[in-house]
Amino acid sequence: MSGRTGQRAVRLTVYLACLLPLVRLATNGLGGRLGPEPIRAVELFTGTWGLTFLVITLAVTPVRRVTGWNWLAGYRRPLGLFAFAYVTLHFLTWFGVDQFFAIRYIGQDILKRPYITVGFASFLLMIPLAITSRKAMVRRLGKRWATLHSLVYVAALGGIVHFVWSAKADLSTPTVYALILVLLLLFRFVPRRSARPRTAGPRDLPTPVP
């Protein structure tokens, strides 16, 4: 197997792994295994996986810097887009299935319930990050791209706050996400190792994140 074929196989495996939660959700839904509150179960499932993929995306750079596995950089964008896809499913489940597109009631809910306010704001914040994740937008925005995409940490923090406030009783899982995010934020302040200067090429372009 050639190197390029191996890379394609790994990438396909990663994509399929990212789709496995959806397969599990569909299987549980068809099998009637979503519990007494199926809508709530779908909202929790999609929201949790959206936050999971978002944290995994943020962890790519620290892992790459520690291990030297630069090939991981190529997975930041797809992982970020999967995170956005799961968060979008979470929002659409609430907006369409739970609230039946009742715009007026939904607007009141967003304004009156803090956990919905924070969650909705985080979702809105992820939209421009997903739109500008393509390499063409990286080139077009230049230095502004990095500034814009640093807001992904704000979106992740908002998602965790939304999770904590909606969980109410069991805070163990959102606490784990919060600790991981704190560690990832602290890692940003760790000085990078100096590297030998080399000629810039296509691979030196920053890889988009959500």
Image (cartoon, rainbow, N blue to C red):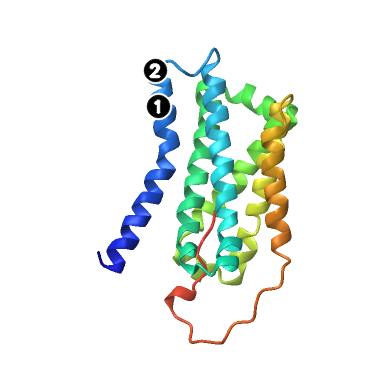
Mark 1: few/some/many CA within 10 Å (<14, 14-19, 20+): some
Q: Callout 1, which amino acid? A: Ala
Say which quarter of the image contains residue 178: top right
Which residue is disc 1 drawn over?
26
Query: In the rendered structure, are the residues bearing label 2 and label 1 in contact, judged by CB atoms less than 8 Å apart?
Result: no
Q: Position of residue 113 (x, y in %)?
A: 73, 27
Q: Callout 2, which amino acid? A: Gly
Tell me the quarter of the image containing the N terminus.
Answer: bottom left
Asked whether residue 99 appears in the rendered view, the answer is: no
Asked whether residue 133 appears in the rendered view, the answer is: yes
Say which quarter of the image contains residue 28: top left
Q: CA distance from mark 2 to mark 1?
A: 8 Å
The reply, left or right, for residue 6 in relation to residue 175 is left
Which one is in front, 170 or 164? 170
Could you tell me which residue is drawn at 55 percent across and 15 percent down?
Answer: 37
The image shows residue 109, relative to residue 81, as above or below, that is above
Could you tell me which residue is drawn at 48 percent across and 83 percent down?
Answer: 200
The image shows residue 125, relative to residue 111, as above or below, that is below
Which residue is disc 2 drawn over?
31
